[in-house]
């Protein structure tokens, strides 16, 4: 366990440091590539015959694999667009408390978008006994929509925070925001939500299409990363 924690901290440090040094496009492409890998992985999980005794990743229900493979293709297109997009001329903004507040609001909304919908994703045992799977699926779907909406709102504030800079360091907040975003593994949240909606040994109820929708939160994250990279100066 200690080794895993040290490895996670090391990866966080390296990814954040790479963003601080200006390797924005490269690191953004790697972050989105993790979303592609997650989508392909979940697609393969549902493509194989169901087996509750599967040791590497048991599933407790059936589901379609094509939404995950389709999402993987879309994310590949986003990655290509990230590297092919032309540079933009950002409007210079002097760093102020407004950028710090925007960063704080972005972090708060991002956490709220993850934890508040959990009340819809994980109903109590008493509720599961009286509510059918269709009703549970609708509530989970609403929770995912709230999660995606909250994620987009948080990314908007992160983008506003990234516009701050100084005369000598115009990309100061762009690099810092992306470094913090990566170091805290906020880019991994869509994969985490999809995993929680698929791996449910207690209830035996899975929501593969809704999980694919949650994983699609990588698309607005991709546009967020692409926008900041396009406005950043080349090192």
Image (tube, rainbow, N blue to C red):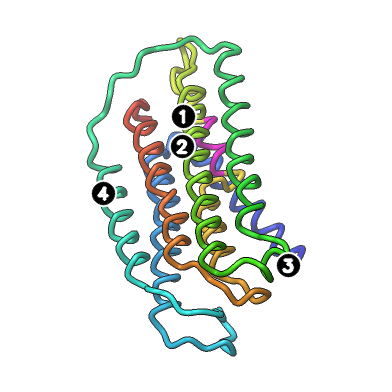
Describe residue 85's horizontal placement relative to residue 29 as left or right: left
Closer to the chain start, of discs 2 and 4, is 4
Mark 2 crowd level (few <14, some 14–19, many ≥20, 10 Å Cα): many
Mark 4 crowd level (few <14, some 14–19, many ≥20, 10 Å Cα): few
Q: Residue at x 24, y 37 (%)?
A: 85
CA separation, marks 1 and 4? Answer: 22 Å
> Residue 90's image quarter?
top left
Q: Would residue 181 be counted in the magenta stretch?
A: yes
First to last magenta residue range: 176-182
Looking at the image, the residue that sits furthest to the front is 130
Front: mark 1 or 4: 1
Q: Which residue is mark 4?
A: 80
Q: Residue at x 51, y 79 (%)?
A: 61
Asked if the residue under mark 3 is in contact with the one under mark 4, i.e. CB atoms within 8 Å, the reply is no
Residue 58 lies, with reference to residue 128, above or below; the image says below
Percent x, y of residue 171: 45, 23
């Amino acid at each position: 366990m200690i080794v895993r924690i040290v490895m996670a901290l090391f990866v966080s440090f390296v990814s954040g440091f790479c963003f601080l040094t200006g390797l924005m496009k490269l690191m953004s492409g790697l972050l989105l590539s993790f979303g592609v890998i997650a989508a392909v992985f979940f697609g393969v999980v549902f493509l194989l015959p169901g087996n509750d005794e599967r040791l590497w990743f048991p599933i407790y229900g059936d589901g379609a694999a094509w939404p995950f493979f389709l999402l993987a293709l879309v994310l590949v297109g986003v990655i290509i667009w990230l590297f092919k997009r032309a540079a933009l001329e950002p409007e210079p903004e002097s760093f102020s408390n407004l950028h710090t507040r925007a960063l704080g609001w972005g972090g708060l909304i991002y956490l709220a978008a993850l934890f508040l919908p959990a009340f819809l994703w994980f109903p109590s045992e008493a509720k599961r006994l009286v509510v059918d799977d269709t009703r549970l699926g609708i509530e989970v779907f609403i929770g995912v929509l709230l999660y995606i909406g909250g994620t987009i709102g948080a990314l908007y504030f992160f983008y506003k925070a990234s516009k701050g800079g100084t005369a000598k360091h115009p990309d100061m907040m762009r690099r810092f925001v992306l470094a913090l975003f990566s170091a805290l593994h906020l880019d991994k949240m869509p994969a985490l939500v999809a995993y929680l909606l698929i791996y449910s040994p207690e209830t035996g109820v899975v929501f593969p299409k809704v999980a694919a929708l949650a994983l699609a939160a990588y698309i607005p994250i991709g546009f967020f990363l692409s926008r900041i990279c396009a406005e950043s100066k080349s090192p």
